[in-house]
Image: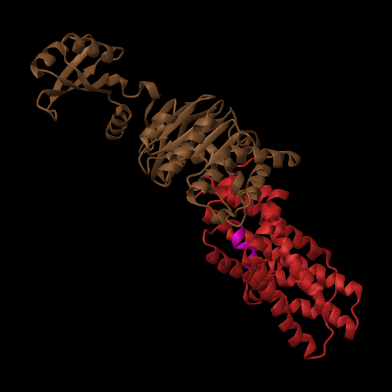
Chain colours: A red, B brown
Amino acid sequence: MLTIFKRDFLAYFRTPVGYVFLGVFAALTGVIFYLGNLATLSGELLIFLSQLTMLIMLLTPVLTMRLLCEERQRRTDQLLLTSPISLTRIVLGKYLAATAVLLIAIALTNVCVLVIAMYGTVYPGEWFVGYLGFTLQAMAFLALDMFVTGFTRNPVSAAIAAFAANFLFWMTDLLADKVGVPFVADTLRFVSLYDRYEPFIIGQLSFASLLYFVTFIALCLIATVRVMDARRFSQGGAA
Amino acid sequence: MIEVEQVSKRYGSVEALKNVTLRAPKGRVLGLLGQNGAGKTTLINIITGYLAPSEGRALIDGHDPLLEPDLARRELGYLPEHPPLYDEMTVEEYLAFAAALKLVRRDAIPAHIREIMVKTGLLEMRERLLGHLSKGYRQRVGVAQALCGDPDTLVLDEPTAGLDPKQITEIRALIRRLSAGKTILFSSHNLAEVRQLCDHVVILHRGEVRLDAPIGDVGQQDGITLQCTVQGSERRLLAAMAHLDGVRDVCAQPACAEDEVCLTLRFDRGALPEKQVFTLCSALSAPILRMTRCEDDLEQAFLRAISE
């Protein structure tokens, strides 16, 4: 797993993908911080983080689109899938590599926190809860994207499908309001990533949400392993 | 050792492999021949565990790569048709990665990959990015990654495809060097290559095994064909040669010079045609200008196998 993690993590920075992701994320974070905090003289850290959700939803597919699709496209998956390393370790290694790049991006947003701290007050508890929720939500998007990209061979299609999936899971609570069947509405509300993130926006450490995010990530990764394994039985090979 | 037991593979209604059974014992080089679309790559993908068969199973040293991947694949080195290279890595980094995937001990990796680079002639290229290598070197790196972990079994899918004649010679020489003590299965379109390198040949056609025989036996069921150009009377030579031991038929074709005759003689298996022809021509005072045993047995066997 460490071997896969190391290779994939370094690959982000040996190709433009890692730099483009971090650069675009940092630049757009700056714009959002300026519009939401500096221009309005607001010191709201949690609101600032919640506004970054759309950015994360948009950009996590960039990280995942290469993980499985590009391996299939370049046929390097044949090296991985005929090695003694298990599929679970391959998927985990790749997921952790993408997560590491994501964590660098999230860590960079602390520059904005420093600015808020310079001109206002940042409470450690608020910082901890805000970043915990935001990071878990971002990791959930990443896991969902990885699962979705497991179905496609083309990285661009993978990125589009992943963004669509992110958007769908984020806004299912809005759909729930329009659905008349209570069971369906409850289910949609239950799976909504936005609903699960909401407690963190108001500074609550919600263990139910924590459990939900961790379970969501685990299920997506297990499903990714199953998709890759099932592909051995279909036409195009496992990854 | 590679064992394939009654393997079939279906893609929807298309049957890519039909009940394929073959065996490559330890220390043997098995050549897999077939036209494009014959099922060679599908069979190789099943042997390596990249694909699952619809029926049957493939074993590497007695282990199923799907059920016991760690045991089966540890002893497997695989060079796919397109070497699986990460263009952004250097040769040395890539081989270290491949060695780590094969579970080589971390502290043993530098010495291990150095040995492989020496064996495959890549030492001078170790700092080069894979994306900057020529096709021949990329193929060598592909072979080198297959050697990581010192596997007992090597599966090489068309290792010389698309290479220039010099590169082909180098890769063949490399395979010949590696063949000592390892089980090697390789697919090829090149009959001469299979003849040079293999102990055993399997011909696949439309997903079926059409021929499975030691290379020495291929084509021998038709006997031995000898072509010779002799100086002398055609009638006299034909009459004399028709009485040689084990001769099936003799025919003459027009030769370049007027007093020369080109003869094609077909003998039973086990006959000693060259010795008999030489002795006879010597007794008839008919100088032999050229004598060749036909080496296209494999080609004939291949054409027969795919036309049946």
- Residue depicted at 58% across the width and 35% down the height: B76
- Would residue B244 appear left or right of A204 to someone viewing this image? left
Q: Is residue A66 visible?
A: yes
| Residue B137, x across and y down, in percent | 52, 47
Q: Is residue B49 visible?
A: no
In this view, the residue in front, B113 or A94, is B113
> Farthest residue in the bottom direction?
A40
| Residue B35, x across and y down, in percent | 35, 40
Magenta span contains residue A65? yes
Span shown in magenta: A61-67
In this view, the residue in front, B190 or A69, is B190
- Would residue B288 appear left or right of A172 to someone viewing this image? left
| Residue A223, x across and y down, in percent | 64, 54
- Would residue B209 appear left or right of A219 to someone viewing this image? left
Prevailing secondary structure of the magenta residues: helix
| Residue B90, x across and y down, in percent | 62, 52
- Residue depicted at 71% across the width and 55% down the height: A218
In this view, the residue in front, A6 or A145, is A6
- Would residue B242 appear left or right of A223 to someone viewing this image? left
In this view, the residue in front, B107 or B70, is B107
Above or below, comparing residue A139 to residue B204 in the picture: below
